Amino acid sequence: MSVAHGLDRLRPPIAVLILYAWTLAWPQTAAADSAIRIFAGTGSFVFVDEKGERSKPITVYTYLPKGLAPGAARIVFVMHGFGKDAQGARDTWVEHADKHEFMVVAPRFDAEQWGRGAYAYASVVNKDGTLRDASLWSFTVIEHLFDVIKGATGNRSPTYFIYGHSEGGQFVHRLVLLLPEARYARAVAANPGWYTMPRFDVRFPYGLAGSPADEVSLQKSLGRQFVLMLGDQDTDPGHASLRKTPRAMAQGAHRFERGQNYFNEAGNRAAELKITLRWRLEIVPGAAHQNSRMSRPAAALLMER
Protein backbone atom coordinates (compact mmCIF):
# COMPACT_ATOMS: atom_id res chain seq x y z
CA MET A 1 0.00 0.00 0.00
CA SER A 2 1.41 3.43 -0.91
CA VAL A 3 1.77 6.13 1.70
CA ALA A 4 -0.53 8.40 -0.30
CA HIS A 5 -3.21 5.71 -0.49
CA GLY A 6 -2.96 5.14 3.26
CA LEU A 7 -3.45 8.86 3.92
CA ASP A 8 -6.49 8.90 1.65
CA ARG A 9 -8.05 6.22 3.82
CA LEU A 10 -7.53 8.44 6.89
CA ARG A 11 -9.05 11.55 5.32
CA PRO A 12 -12.70 12.21 6.28
CA PRO A 13 -15.23 12.54 3.45
CA ILE A 14 -15.47 16.04 1.98
CA ALA A 15 -19.04 16.38 3.27
CA VAL A 16 -17.80 15.89 6.84
CA LEU A 17 -15.17 18.58 6.35
CA ILE A 18 -17.78 20.98 4.99
CA LEU A 19 -20.13 20.25 7.91
CA TYR A 20 -17.27 20.78 10.39
CA ALA A 21 -16.33 24.12 8.84
CA TRP A 22 -19.99 25.22 8.79
CA THR A 23 -20.31 24.31 12.48
CA LEU A 24 -17.26 26.39 13.39
CA ALA A 25 -18.58 29.35 11.42
CA TRP A 26 -22.07 29.20 13.06
CA PRO A 27 -22.54 32.10 15.50
CA GLN A 28 -22.06 31.20 19.14
CA THR A 29 -25.51 32.52 20.01
CA ALA A 30 -27.23 30.06 17.69
CA ALA A 31 -27.20 27.27 20.28
CA ALA A 32 -28.56 29.61 22.94
CA ASP A 33 -31.25 30.90 20.57
CA SER A 34 -32.37 27.42 19.63
CA ALA A 35 -32.77 26.47 23.30
CA ILE A 36 -35.30 29.25 23.85
CA ARG A 37 -38.94 28.47 23.20
CA ILE A 38 -41.71 30.99 23.87
CA PHE A 39 -45.17 29.46 23.64
CA ALA A 40 -48.63 30.77 24.50
CA GLY A 41 -49.14 31.14 28.22
CA THR A 42 -46.52 31.37 30.94
CA GLY A 43 -43.03 29.96 30.57
CA SER A 44 -39.39 30.44 31.48
CA PHE A 45 -35.88 29.77 30.22
CA VAL A 46 -32.30 30.32 31.38
CA PHE A 47 -30.35 33.01 29.54
CA VAL A 48 -26.55 32.93 29.39
CA ASP A 49 -25.30 36.27 28.12
CA GLU A 50 -22.68 35.24 25.56
CA LYS A 51 -22.01 38.90 24.76
CA GLY A 52 -21.64 39.96 28.39
CA GLU A 53 -21.41 38.39 31.85
CA ARG A 54 -21.38 34.69 30.87
CA SER A 55 -20.79 33.53 34.45
CA LYS A 56 -24.17 34.85 35.63
CA PRO A 57 -27.04 32.86 34.08
CA ILE A 58 -30.40 34.59 34.37
CA THR A 59 -33.81 32.95 34.66
CA VAL A 60 -36.26 34.71 32.37
CA TYR A 61 -40.03 34.44 32.88
CA THR A 62 -42.31 34.99 29.90
CA TYR A 63 -45.95 35.29 28.99
CA LEU A 64 -47.48 35.24 25.51
CA PRO A 65 -51.23 35.75 24.99
CA LYS A 66 -53.03 32.97 23.14
CA GLY A 67 -53.34 33.63 19.44
CA LEU A 68 -50.40 36.06 19.40
CA ALA A 69 -47.44 34.85 17.34
CA PRO A 70 -44.11 35.41 19.15
CA GLY A 71 -42.55 36.59 15.92
CA ALA A 72 -45.11 39.39 15.58
CA ALA A 73 -45.50 40.40 19.23
CA ARG A 74 -44.39 43.66 20.77
CA ILE A 75 -41.90 42.88 23.54
CA VAL A 76 -42.25 44.39 27.02
CA PHE A 77 -39.53 43.88 29.60
CA VAL A 78 -40.81 43.99 33.19
CA MET A 79 -38.10 44.64 35.78
CA HIS A 80 -38.60 43.30 39.31
CA GLY A 81 -38.06 45.15 42.57
CA PHE A 82 -35.82 44.50 45.57
CA GLY A 83 -37.59 41.22 46.37
CA LYS A 84 -36.26 39.72 43.10
CA ASP A 85 -39.70 38.26 42.35
CA ALA A 86 -39.50 38.27 38.56
CA GLN A 87 -42.12 35.53 38.30
CA GLY A 88 -44.57 37.60 40.34
CA ALA A 89 -43.75 40.68 38.26
CA ARG A 90 -44.52 38.68 35.12
CA ASP A 91 -47.78 37.40 36.58
CA THR A 92 -48.93 40.95 37.43
CA TRP A 93 -48.59 41.86 33.77
CA VAL A 94 -50.52 38.89 32.33
CA GLU A 95 -53.86 40.74 32.21
CA HIS A 96 -52.21 43.78 30.63
CA ALA A 97 -50.56 41.61 27.98
CA ASP A 98 -53.90 40.03 27.16
CA LYS A 99 -55.57 43.41 26.87
CA HIS A 100 -52.89 45.18 24.83
CA GLU A 101 -51.50 42.11 23.02
CA PHE A 102 -47.80 42.01 23.80
CA MET A 103 -45.20 39.55 25.04
CA VAL A 104 -43.97 39.90 28.64
CA VAL A 105 -40.31 39.20 29.40
CA ALA A 106 -39.26 39.37 33.07
CA PRO A 107 -35.58 38.56 33.80
CA ARG A 108 -34.53 37.73 37.36
CA PHE A 109 -31.33 39.36 38.62
CA ASP A 110 -30.82 37.20 41.71
CA ALA A 111 -29.23 38.50 44.90
CA GLU A 112 -26.41 35.96 44.85
CA GLN A 113 -25.02 37.16 41.53
CA TRP A 114 -26.41 40.69 41.27
CA GLY A 115 -26.58 41.80 44.90
CA ARG A 116 -25.05 44.87 46.58
CA GLY A 117 -26.50 47.16 43.95
CA ALA A 118 -25.13 45.27 40.94
CA TYR A 119 -28.65 45.06 39.52
CA ALA A 120 -29.70 48.68 39.98
CA TYR A 121 -26.40 50.57 39.55
CA ALA A 122 -23.16 48.97 40.77
CA SER A 123 -22.40 46.86 37.70
CA VAL A 124 -21.25 50.10 36.03
CA VAL A 125 -18.26 50.63 38.31
CA ASN A 126 -15.62 48.49 40.00
CA LYS A 127 -15.01 48.68 43.73
CA ASP A 128 -12.10 51.06 43.12
CA GLY A 129 -14.39 53.43 41.22
CA THR A 130 -13.10 52.59 37.74
CA LEU A 131 -15.61 51.94 35.00
CA ARG A 132 -16.46 48.42 33.91
CA ASP A 133 -16.85 47.45 30.29
CA ALA A 134 -20.38 48.36 29.19
CA SER A 135 -20.99 44.81 27.93
CA LEU A 136 -20.96 43.64 31.57
CA TRP A 137 -23.54 46.10 32.90
CA SER A 138 -26.90 44.83 34.11
CA PHE A 139 -28.56 47.37 31.81
CA THR A 140 -26.81 45.93 28.74
CA VAL A 141 -28.24 42.50 29.55
CA ILE A 142 -31.59 43.78 28.25
CA GLU A 143 -30.08 44.68 24.88
CA HIS A 144 -28.43 41.26 24.58
CA LEU A 145 -31.57 39.43 25.73
CA PHE A 146 -33.63 41.35 23.19
CA ASP A 147 -31.36 40.10 20.40
CA VAL A 148 -31.55 36.50 21.61
CA ILE A 149 -35.35 36.55 21.85
CA LYS A 150 -35.58 38.01 18.38
CA GLY A 151 -33.25 35.32 17.05
CA ALA A 152 -35.20 32.53 18.74
CA THR A 153 -38.66 33.69 17.62
CA GLY A 154 -37.98 35.43 14.32
CA ASN A 155 -39.33 38.62 15.85
CA ARG A 156 -38.51 41.63 13.69
CA SER A 157 -39.37 44.40 16.15
CA PRO A 158 -36.66 47.08 15.99
CA THR A 159 -37.54 48.28 19.49
CA TYR A 160 -38.84 47.05 22.85
CA PHE A 161 -40.71 48.55 25.80
CA ILE A 162 -39.55 48.45 29.41
CA TYR A 163 -41.12 49.00 32.83
CA GLY A 164 -39.82 48.72 36.36
CA HIS A 165 -41.25 49.39 39.82
CA SER A 166 -39.28 50.39 42.95
CA GLU A 167 -35.76 48.97 42.45
CA GLY A 168 -36.91 48.02 38.98
CA GLY A 169 -37.69 51.71 38.49
CA GLN A 170 -34.16 52.53 39.58
CA PHE A 171 -32.91 50.08 36.97
CA VAL A 172 -35.03 51.63 34.21
CA HIS A 173 -34.18 55.27 34.90
CA ARG A 174 -30.45 54.46 34.95
CA LEU A 175 -30.71 52.48 31.73
CA VAL A 176 -32.23 55.61 30.19
CA LEU A 177 -29.37 57.78 31.50
CA LEU A 178 -26.46 55.45 30.78
CA LEU A 179 -27.53 53.71 27.56
CA PRO A 180 -28.81 56.59 25.42
CA GLU A 181 -28.65 54.39 22.30
CA ALA A 182 -30.70 51.54 23.84
CA ARG A 183 -33.45 50.31 21.56
CA TYR A 184 -36.46 50.96 23.79
CA ALA A 185 -39.40 52.72 22.18
CA ARG A 186 -40.72 53.89 25.55
CA ALA A 187 -39.52 53.36 29.12
CA VAL A 188 -41.50 53.72 32.36
CA ALA A 189 -39.96 53.90 35.84
CA ALA A 190 -42.48 53.68 38.69
CA ASN A 191 -41.77 54.78 42.27
CA PRO A 192 -37.97 54.51 42.39
CA GLY A 193 -36.58 54.90 45.92
CA TRP A 194 -33.65 57.12 44.93
CA TYR A 195 -32.02 58.43 41.79
CA THR A 196 -28.95 59.11 39.74
CA MET A 197 -29.57 62.82 39.36
CA PRO A 198 -28.81 64.31 35.92
CA ARG A 199 -26.05 66.45 37.43
CA PHE A 200 -22.31 66.41 36.81
CA ASP A 201 -21.41 67.96 40.18
CA VAL A 202 -22.64 64.91 42.15
CA ARG A 203 -20.72 61.62 42.14
CA PHE A 204 -22.22 58.46 40.69
CA PRO A 205 -24.46 56.69 41.63
CA TYR A 206 -26.24 59.73 43.12
CA GLY A 207 -25.22 61.88 40.16
CA LEU A 208 -23.41 61.54 36.85
CA ALA A 209 -19.90 62.63 37.90
CA GLY A 210 -17.54 59.71 37.39
CA SER A 211 -20.05 57.86 35.21
CA PRO A 212 -19.76 57.20 31.46
CA ALA A 213 -22.36 59.92 30.77
CA ASP A 214 -21.43 63.32 29.36
CA GLU A 215 -23.39 66.31 28.06
CA VAL A 216 -23.80 64.78 24.60
CA SER A 217 -25.19 61.50 25.92
CA LEU A 218 -27.38 63.34 28.43
CA GLN A 219 -28.93 65.37 25.61
CA LYS A 220 -29.84 62.10 23.88
CA SER A 221 -31.28 60.63 27.07
CA LEU A 222 -33.42 63.69 27.79
CA GLY A 223 -34.78 63.50 24.27
CA ARG A 224 -36.03 59.91 24.58
CA GLN A 225 -39.53 58.64 25.42
CA PHE A 226 -39.27 58.19 29.18
CA VAL A 227 -42.12 58.35 31.70
CA LEU A 228 -41.63 58.73 35.44
CA MET A 229 -44.68 57.45 37.31
CA LEU A 230 -45.24 58.37 40.95
CA GLY A 231 -47.94 57.32 43.37
CA ASP A 232 -49.08 60.42 45.22
CA GLN A 233 -49.43 58.39 48.43
CA ASP A 234 -45.88 56.98 48.30
CA THR A 235 -44.96 59.40 51.05
CA ASP A 236 -43.78 57.26 53.97
CA PRO A 237 -40.38 58.65 55.11
CA GLY A 238 -39.89 55.57 57.30
CA HIS A 239 -40.66 52.92 54.67
CA ALA A 240 -38.55 49.83 55.37
CA SER A 241 -36.96 49.68 51.92
CA LEU A 242 -36.43 53.42 51.47
CA ARG A 243 -32.74 54.35 51.29
CA LYS A 244 -31.88 56.80 54.06
CA THR A 245 -28.23 57.65 53.42
CA PRO A 246 -27.42 61.38 53.64
CA ARG A 247 -27.11 61.69 49.84
CA ALA A 248 -30.42 59.88 49.33
CA MET A 249 -32.15 62.04 51.94
CA ALA A 250 -30.83 65.11 50.12
CA GLN A 251 -33.07 64.07 47.22
CA GLY A 252 -36.20 64.25 49.37
CA ALA A 253 -37.88 62.85 52.46
CA HIS A 254 -39.85 60.15 50.62
CA ARG A 255 -40.30 58.63 47.17
CA PHE A 256 -42.97 61.04 45.96
CA GLU A 257 -40.85 64.07 46.85
CA ARG A 258 -37.66 62.55 45.44
CA GLY A 259 -39.36 61.74 42.14
CA GLN A 260 -40.64 65.28 41.70
CA ASN A 261 -37.21 66.68 42.48
CA TYR A 262 -35.65 64.31 39.95
CA PHE A 263 -38.02 65.36 37.22
CA ASN A 264 -37.40 69.04 38.01
CA GLU A 265 -33.64 68.46 37.75
CA ALA A 266 -34.17 66.92 34.32
CA GLY A 267 -36.09 70.01 33.27
CA ASN A 268 -33.29 72.23 34.54
CA ARG A 269 -30.66 70.29 32.57
CA ALA A 270 -32.76 70.40 29.40
CA ALA A 271 -33.09 74.20 29.75
CA GLU A 272 -29.34 74.59 30.30
CA LEU A 273 -28.60 72.40 27.27
CA LYS A 274 -31.23 74.28 25.23
CA ILE A 275 -33.09 71.14 24.21
CA THR A 276 -36.68 69.98 24.50
CA LEU A 277 -37.32 67.59 27.37
CA ARG A 278 -39.38 64.69 26.04
CA TRP A 279 -39.79 63.03 29.43
CA ARG A 280 -43.19 62.91 31.11
CA LEU A 281 -44.22 62.90 34.74
CA GLU A 282 -47.38 60.93 35.49
CA ILE A 283 -48.98 61.00 38.96
CA VAL A 284 -51.18 58.05 39.96
CA PRO A 285 -53.80 59.31 42.45
CA GLY A 286 -54.28 57.18 45.55
CA ALA A 287 -51.34 54.89 44.87
CA ALA A 288 -48.70 54.27 47.50
CA HIS A 289 -45.70 51.97 46.99
CA GLN A 290 -47.86 49.45 45.11
CA ASN A 291 -46.77 47.81 41.89
CA SER A 292 -50.31 46.49 41.41
CA ARG A 293 -51.67 50.06 41.34
CA MET A 294 -48.95 51.33 38.98
CA SER A 295 -48.82 48.54 36.40
CA ARG A 296 -52.23 49.14 34.80
CA PRO A 297 -51.69 52.81 33.86
CA ALA A 298 -48.08 51.97 32.97
CA ALA A 299 -49.20 49.35 30.44
CA ALA A 300 -51.58 51.84 28.87
CA LEU A 301 -48.76 54.41 28.63
CA LEU A 302 -46.32 51.94 27.12
CA MET A 303 -48.78 50.94 24.41
CA GLU A 304 -49.99 54.49 23.77
CA ARG A 305 -50.06 55.31 20.09
Image (cartoon, rainbow, N blue to C red):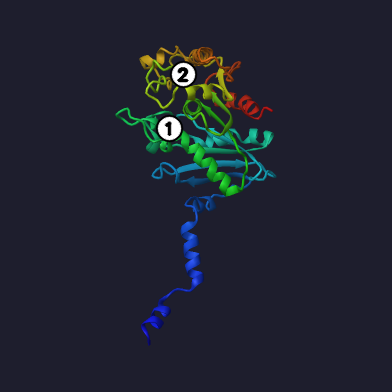
- Kind of residue sitting beneath label 1: Tyr
Residue drawn at (50%, 61%) of the image? 22
Q: Position of residue 70 (x, y in %)?
A: 63, 45
Residue drawn at (50%, 56%) of the image? 26
Q: Position of residue 275 (x, y in %)?
A: 56, 17
Element class at badge 1: loop
Please tell me the numbered disc located at residue 198: 2
Q: CA distance from mark 2 to mark 1?
A: 20 Å
Nearer to me, 198 or 88: 198
- Quarter of the figure with the N terminus: bottom left
Element class at badge 2: loop
Left or right? Give the position of 110 relative to 158.
left
Answer with mark 2 or mark 1, whichever residue precedes in sequence.
1
Please tell me the numbered disc located at residue 62: none
Q: Residues within 10 Å of mark 2 (few under 14, many from 20)?
A: many
Residue drawn at (37%, 34%) of the image? 132
Residue marked by disc 1: 119
61 to 175, vertically: above or below? below
Q: Position of residue 133 (x, y in %)?
A: 39, 36
- Quarter of the figure with the C terminus: top right
Nearer to me, 198 or 239: 198
288 to 31, vertically: above or below? above
- Kind of residue sitting beneath label 2: Pro
Nearer to me, 262 or 19: 19
Q: Can residue 294 be seen by looking at this rendering?
A: yes
Nearer to me, 297 or 224: 224
Q: How many marks?
A: 2
Residue drawn at (59%, 36%) of the image? 159
Q: Position of residue 179 (x, y in %)?
A: 49, 30
